[in-house]
Image (spheres, rainbow, N blue to C red):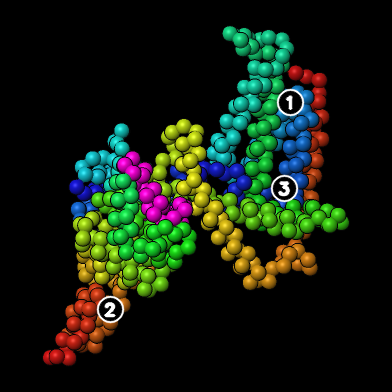
């Protein structure tokens, strides 16, 4: 029960002069139940990578195995794969189209060919889990606020009960509060249901606090791969490719340079507070 | 899949053709298309093919890139050819079952295929070497005389350039929404005609909403920069004919006269 990418390459634009190599020999294993953050700046190939995982894009070369089966094998049911690997796109509210929120969330499970009652049950469950107030269920999705629309869109994917949930920049365009709410929701989903979650982002701050493992993508290949602490230790490399470590990393490094004895590999604000408070106690 | 449409797209490279005044290219393309309908024998077409090949060479746009854009109209071309081939009455060459190919039909089919192909390659050559902005600039200038009849020339040109600008954006958007719905299990490819038409709803509704949103944003942005139509509006880079433009006109007229003379010689 895992996803394995074996030497995956992807080239946009085939053999025209405009061809761009978007993925370059990517090898990756994602074990079950992991919360993985995928980070890279715009155009690094992170969105391209995740679209391979549910078969929306087909690799130019290489193999992808889901639960030990090659998804490019002849006769492999890609539709079934898409129900197991749920993908929430960037600005997912742009995909809403039904007359009310509830019907829109029903779209996914209905496509799976489930019975009417099962479809409605799943839609209800999904809307409940994203914490949308019940009085909004029968409103037009276009009347909701940005953050609410995004919840609806995430519910639309959750209602298919995927084993793996991929979110492509789920916090883009949200205010800080909306961002925290969405990220907390994702963390809650992961701890409660044990889903594998892939969170694509360009913001280290978003990812550092939540994920078990970080993958840094640059120019279509994997640059760094490891636990957040390990990855942020390479903050200078991250800067070179236009990314940054969380601000606390910089503060801790600066303190260390001033001769204070703090652990400079901490990644979250809470840990940093502990460290600094520890200094005063001494 | 939608990326493959090259018709009406600009191809960025350096060439004489790219530098020409858009009016020359628009005029030249119209003249070229017109010329195609004057030929009575295949010598004329041969001349046109050679001329087109030379111009393509000058444009530095790879031929394979142009051909890719042709794929979308291949079907149309095929239907026209087949109808002409089988349905033209005249001297029978080959016949099997109820179908027969006549000498006239063969000639008509080849002629129409040649004309259509060159017409499309010729006009896509114009759009490939001219930026949409330049193209509408040229059209606005060429249609300038219509202002006497109170025709809103500038507004029409502006509308066209916006429409052209939005084609790739909307194509990309379609691709995105399609993928998003496919990730939710939508199926756009199987089922009968009605099922397929119904499957388009989850694609079209978001697409329309996003098109309206974009139109709204654009209108707002234009107004914020004090756009108020064509009256009294000047250009930063007004179009001006240069020496090479006159030369290009000369070449075009030379080609027209020569090939029409060839195409009307009493051979074939």
Q: Is residue A105 magenta?
A: yes
Residue A145: percent from left, percent from top = 44, 66
Q: Nearer the viewer, residue B161 or A17?
A: B161
Q: Nearer the viewer, residue B194 or B146?
A: B194
Residue B137 in view, yes or no: no
Q: Is residue A43 left or right of residue A7?
A: right
Q: Residue at x 39, y 48 (%)?
A: A107
> What is the quadrant of residue B268 in the picture?
top right
Query: Residue under circle 3?
Result: B25
Q: Is residue B137 magenta?
A: no
Marks 3 and 2: CB-CB under 8 Å?
no
Residue A27: percent from left, percent from top = 26, 50
Q: Earlier in the sequence, mark 1 or mark 3?
A: 3
Q: Which residues lie in the magenta part? A: A88-116
Both marks 3 and 2 on one chain: no
SS for callout 1: helix
Query: Residue under circle 2?
Result: A248
């Amino acid at each position: 029960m895992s996803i394995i990418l074996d030497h995956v390459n992807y080239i946009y634009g085939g053999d025209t002069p405009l061809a761009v190599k978007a993925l370059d020999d990517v090898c990756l294993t994602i074990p079950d139940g992991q919360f993985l953050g995928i980070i890279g700046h715009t155009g690094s190939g992170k969105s391209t990578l995740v679209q391979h995982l549910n078969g929306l894009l087909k690799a130019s070369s290489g193999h992808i195995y889901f639960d030990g089966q090659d998804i490019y094998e002849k006769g492999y049911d890609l539709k079934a794969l898409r129900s197991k690997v749920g993908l929430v796109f960037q600005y997912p509210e742009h995909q809403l189209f039904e007359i009310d929120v509830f019907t829109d969330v029903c779209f996914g499970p209905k496509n799976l060919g489930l019975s009417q009652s099962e479809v409605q049950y799943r839609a209800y469950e999904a809307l409940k889990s994203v914490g949308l107030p019940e009085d909004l269920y029968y409103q037009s999705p276009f009347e909701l606020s940005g953050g609410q629309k995004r919840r609806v869109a995430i519910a639309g994917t959750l209602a298919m009960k995927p084993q793996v949930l991929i979110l492509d920049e789920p916090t883009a365009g949200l205010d800080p509060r909306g961002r925290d709410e969405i990220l907390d929701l994702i963390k809650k989903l992961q701890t409660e249901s044990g889903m594998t979650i892939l969170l694509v982002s360009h913001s280290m701050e978003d990812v550092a606090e939540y994920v078990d493992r970080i993958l840094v993508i640059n120019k279509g290949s994997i640059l760094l791969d490891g636990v957040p602490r390990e990855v942020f230790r390479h903050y200078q490399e991250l800067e070179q490719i236009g990314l940054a470590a969380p601000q606390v990393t910089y503060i801790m490094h600066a303190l260390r340079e001033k001769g204070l004895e703090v652990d400079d590999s901490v990644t979250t604000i809470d840990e940093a507070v502990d460290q600094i408070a520890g200094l005063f106690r001494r | 899949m939608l990326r493959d449409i090259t018709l009406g797209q600009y191809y960025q490279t350096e060439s004489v053709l790219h530098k020409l005044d858009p009016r020359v290219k628009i005029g030249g393309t119209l003249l070229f298309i017109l010329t195609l309908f004057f030929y009575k024998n295949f010598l004329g077409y041969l001349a046109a093919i050679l001329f087109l090949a030379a111009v393509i060479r000058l444009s530095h746009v790879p031929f394979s890139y142009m051909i890719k854009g042709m794929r979308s109209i291949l079907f149309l071309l095929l239907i026209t050819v087949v109808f002409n081939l089988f349905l033209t009455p005249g001297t029978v060459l080959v016949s099997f079952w109820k179908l027969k190919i006549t000498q006239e039909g063969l000639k008509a089919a080849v002629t129409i295929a040649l004309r259509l192909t060159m017409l499309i390659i010729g006009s896509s050559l114009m759009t490939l070497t001219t930026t949409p902005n330049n193209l509408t600039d040229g059209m606005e200038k060429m249609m300038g005389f219509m202002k006497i009849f109170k025709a809103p020339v500038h507004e029409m040109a502006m509308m066209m350039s916006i429409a052209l600008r939005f084609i790739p954006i909307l194509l990309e958007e379609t691709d995105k929404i399609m993928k998003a719905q496919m990730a939710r299990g939508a199926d756009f490819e199987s089922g009968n005609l009605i099922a397929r038409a119904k499957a388009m709803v989850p694609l079209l509704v978001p697409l329309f909403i996003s098109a309206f949103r974009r139109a709204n944003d654009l209108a707002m942005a234009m107004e914020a920069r004090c756009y108020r139509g064509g009256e009294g509006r000047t250009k930063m880079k007004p179009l001006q004919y240069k020496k090479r433009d006159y030369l290009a006109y000369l070449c075009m007229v030379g080609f027209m006269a020569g090939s029409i003379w060839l195409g009307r010689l009493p051979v074939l």
